[in-house]
């Protein structure tokens, strides 16, 4: 077969050989484009379009993993007794509330009574939310009384931690 192809090629005129060579090269280029370059190019465009979403998903997963680790750590280190009382007092100070007259009384290992004679309402709500999210200290009950000064309240409440199992 190789011999018959070689003799056929030798019988062709030089112009015909060039024409067949150029046609074969063109056919090879067209097939390479159709079966290799074009599908790869199409897939590259699709991947480029989905890249921002994949990056957002990766960032979301990273933040969720960090939150899970933080929750796992806080669940394992539930505050009890004097540590619970100290955490609430520290959070009040960090919130910038006037600690004058504030009473945090330990009722048992998992519950405290809190009395704040004068606090901004928004500050109290932010404090309660922060204690719940960061320290796993929940507001059991609360009595809020408006004071004569705008936005200021008197707060009486009970806060608790619950025994939590490891995640």
Image (spheres, grey):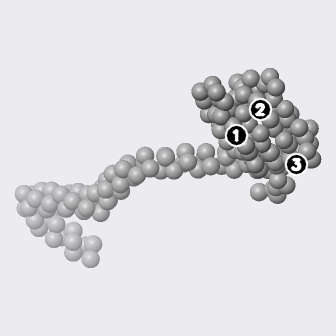
Marker disc for residue 110: 3
Q: Which mark is residue 22?
A: none
Residue plotted at (63% across, 25% down): 149
Q: Are marks 1 and 3 in contact (CB under 8 Å)?
A: no
Indicate the position of residue 109 as horizontal and vertical percent values.
92, 47
Q: Measured from the top left, where is residue 61 in percent x and y? A: 58, 50
Q: Earlier in the sequence, mark 2 or mark 1?
A: 2
- Residue 128 appears in the figure: yes
Going 49% across and 46% down the picture, which residue do you hit? 55
Alpha-carbon neighbours of circle 1 within 10 Å: few (<14), some, or many (≥20)? some
Q: Is residue 62 placed above or below 164 in the rendered structure?
A: above
Left or right of residue 2, residue 13 in this image: left
* Contact, mark 3 vs mark 2 (Cβ under 8 Å): no
Where's residue 96, x and y in %?
Answer: 70, 24
Q: Does residue 109 appear to the left or right of 54 in the view shown?
A: right
Nearest to the eye among marks 3 and 2: give it. 2
> Is 48 drawn above or below residue 3 in the view shown?
above
Mark 3, other Cα within 10 Å: few <14 / some 14–19 / many ≥20 = some
Which quadrant of the structure image shows residue 155? top right
Residue placed under numbered mark 2 in the picture: 116
Q: Position of residue 34 (x, y in %)?
A: 25, 61
In this view, the mark in front (1 or 3) = 1
- Above or below, 113 against 140 in this view is above
Q: Which mark is residue 144?
A: 1
- Residue at image coords 44%, 50%: 53
121 vs 50: above or below: above
Quadrant of the rendering where the C terminus is positioned: bottom right
Secondary element type, mark 3: loop
Depth check: 7 or 86 in front?
A: 86
Residue at disc 1, secondary structure: strand
Q: Which callout, 1 or 3, points at the residue further toward the start of the chain?
A: 3
């Amino acid at each position: 077969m190789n011999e018959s192809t070689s003799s056929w090629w030798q019988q062709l005129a030089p112009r015909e050989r060039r024409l067949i060579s150029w046609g074969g090269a063109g056919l090879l280029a067209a097939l390479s484009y159709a079966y290799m370059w074009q599908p790869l190019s199409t897939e590259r465009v699709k991947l480029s379009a989905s890249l921002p979403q994949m990056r957002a998903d990766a960032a979301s997963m990273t933040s969720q993993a960090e939150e899970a680790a933080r929750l796992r750590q806080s669940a394992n280190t539930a505050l009890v007794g004097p540590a619970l009382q100290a955490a609430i007092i520290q959070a009040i100070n960090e919130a910038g509330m006037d600690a004058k007259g504030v009473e945090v009384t330990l009722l048992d290992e998992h519950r405290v009574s809190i009395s704040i004679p004068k606090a901004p309402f928004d500050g109290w709500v932010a404090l309660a939310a922060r204690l719940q999210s960061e320290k796993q200290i929940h507001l059991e009950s609360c009595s809020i009384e408006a004071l004569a000064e705008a936005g200021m309240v008197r707060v009486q409440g009970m806060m608790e931690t619950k025994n939590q199992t490891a995640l």
